[in-house]
Image: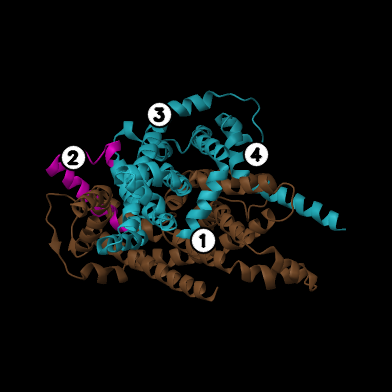
Chain colours: A cyan, B brown
Amino acid sequence: MKKVIMIIVEMITVVICLCYLFPIYIVLVNSFKNRQELYENMLALPQKFSFDYFTKAMSKMNFTRAFTNSFIVTVVSIAIIIVLASMTAWMFVRMNNQFSKFMFMVFVATMIIPFQTIMMPLMQVMGWARDTLHLPMLNTLGGLIYMNVGFGASMAVFLFHGFIKSIPISLEEAATIDGCNKFKVFWKIVFPILKPTTATVIILDVIWIWNDYLLPSLVLSGKELRTIPLSTASFFGQFTIEWNLAMSGLMLTIIPVIVFYLAAQKYIVKGVAAGAVKQ
Amino acid sequence: MKKIRDKAWYALFVSPLIFVFTTVVIIPFIIGIGYSFISWDGMPLNEKTFVGFDNYIRLFVDKRFMTSAGHTVLFTIFAVLLINVLGLFFALLVTSKLKARNAVRTMLFMPYLIGGLILGYIWKFIFTDVFKSIGELTGWTKVFFSWLLDPQYALAAMIVVTTWQMAGYIMIIYINGIQAMPEDIIEAGKVDGAGFWQTLFRIKFPLIMPSFTISLFLTLSNCFKIFDVNFSLTGGGPNNATEMMAMNIYNEIFSLSNYGYGQAKAIIFFIAVAIITLIQVSITKKREVEM
């Protein structure tokens, strides 16, 4: 009896999962079809697997360019966030003076500000920096990276701060007696211990920066600078009627995410859970 | 001497991030409050006139803004309920003794990584063309028609897509809560003769209350601030029937060029989000004392 129930539950689960992935199935099968075949039956498998529409969508979306831009922005932003936030959090914990306490509170408190509240004044500030100080803050990948670092700072500092508090100080003291300066103590001793938190921050920031649409859409106006979400959005603005081509385009944007997910699944699930619980 | 050197190291370590953070978050936030008291069309050469609290008074009688606030609340309530019920159900499936549990977890979590914008476009195709063709094939045209053309169904479509995206994410949090449950308490319950439902409602649910609070408020603030899915799936349409607050602010500033007025809305939006978050913090704190 129990075995029969288990088999039924198992079957229901499989059915739920298949239903859950139905939209991705729709994208996949229709990305191989031509326009006429798509409208004949959207649920059927394609009659032949031609990659023509992929190459066409690739060139229309300027996919390789967009992928490179997204990759640069994601990797560089996260590298800077990790380096600066871990150093800041370490100092906040180890030199816990009034200023540290105050700034840490400010970092945590600003986490609740929704992006819509600062997007317009932020563009004014960056416009001013460009016009008055001649800094290339708008319409450059560097400007976008700078702003990503600002927006990612709070959560990274918060996560590192929580972890560093639990590390005993004795190791660092020993290293200081041995003649290490603060820089060496941090990079040789503390930073390697922070690995689990570093992994969490990387995962959460990859999901956020790779998929971010609104901030890049405000900062970047040049065609050549588009990230993947931006090129997808402009692609849809122009070709909404050509659904078969649009499906190939969407499949292209999903593939890197799936590859990343399958490669780093263990870390992603752990990182997302750790990040959520601490927020 | 040592003190000065320590202070120099301190400044060297913390000042870069504090500088970036201040210029990107703090300064825009403060001058944003200033912008909410002026009337301006965004053109640098056009003048900015101080209008006091006029912008704030105006937005409370702005029908489009108030409707979007109402839709946001409605959307948030339904989406939060659905996401949590499904997320918990998935978590219970994945932590059972199923053979396929790891594969199931992998599949259910996938949509969360794809991102709201892309998901919105995928579902736009499904709700318009695929639904229409299913309707024609089966004859069930009452359910399968182009959902995005009907105001109520378009709002339902928003809820479906958001649920589809977030349920797997919330599942991960519930899984963590379930796995942290002490086995011996459940065993003790079974020895005392508790059945499946009794174990579920009397032992398991109370034990995962902390994950429940986290999930509830994560979904609450995420749904309340929704923009990407809104932008790509419905674009606010038909006839602004699905325009959420975040999108209303975006349109007011960047489409209608009411920079001052739009910023006043953005400040009200911030206050609403802050209230939700503060309630969350106070509830979580209380619970921690009890545990």
Residue at mark 3 to residue at mark 2: CA–CA distance: 28 Å
Number of residues whose C-alpha sits closer than 10 Å to that of mark 4, classed few (under 14), some (14–19) or many (20 or more): some
Amino acid type, callout 2: Leu
**SS category of the residue bearing label 2:** loop
Query: Is A124 within the magenta?
Result: yes
**Chain letter of the residue carrying label 4:** A
Which-is-in-front pick, marks 3 and 2? 2
The residue at which mark 3 appears reads as: A62
Nearer the N terminus, badge 4 or badge 3? Answer: 4
| B218 or B204: nearer the viewer | B204
For the C terminus of chain A, give its image quadrant: bottom left
**Chain letter of the residue carrying label 1:** B
**Chain letter of the residue carrying label 3:** A
Query: Is A91 within the magenta?
Result: no
Give the magenta part as a residue range.
Answer: A117-143
Residue at horizontal 19 percent and vertical 62 percent from the top: B34
**SS category of the residue bearing label 3:** loop
Residue at mark 2 to residue at mark 1: CA–CA distance: 47 Å
Asked if residue A146 is positioned above or below residue B269 in the image, the reply reads above
The numbered dot on residue A200 is none
Amino acid type, callout 4: Leu
**Chain letter of the residue carrying label 2:** A
Q: Are marks 2 and 1 in contact (CB under 8 Å)?
A: no
Number of residues whose C-alpha sits closer than 10 Å to that of mark 2, classed few (under 14), some (14–19) or many (20 or more): few
Quadrant in the picture for residue A29: top right
| B218 or B193: nearer the viewer | B193
Number of residues whose C-alpha sits closer than 10 Å to that of mark 3, classed few (under 14), some (14–19) or many (20 or more): some
**SS category of the residue bearing label 4:** loop
**SS category of the residue bearing label 1:** helix
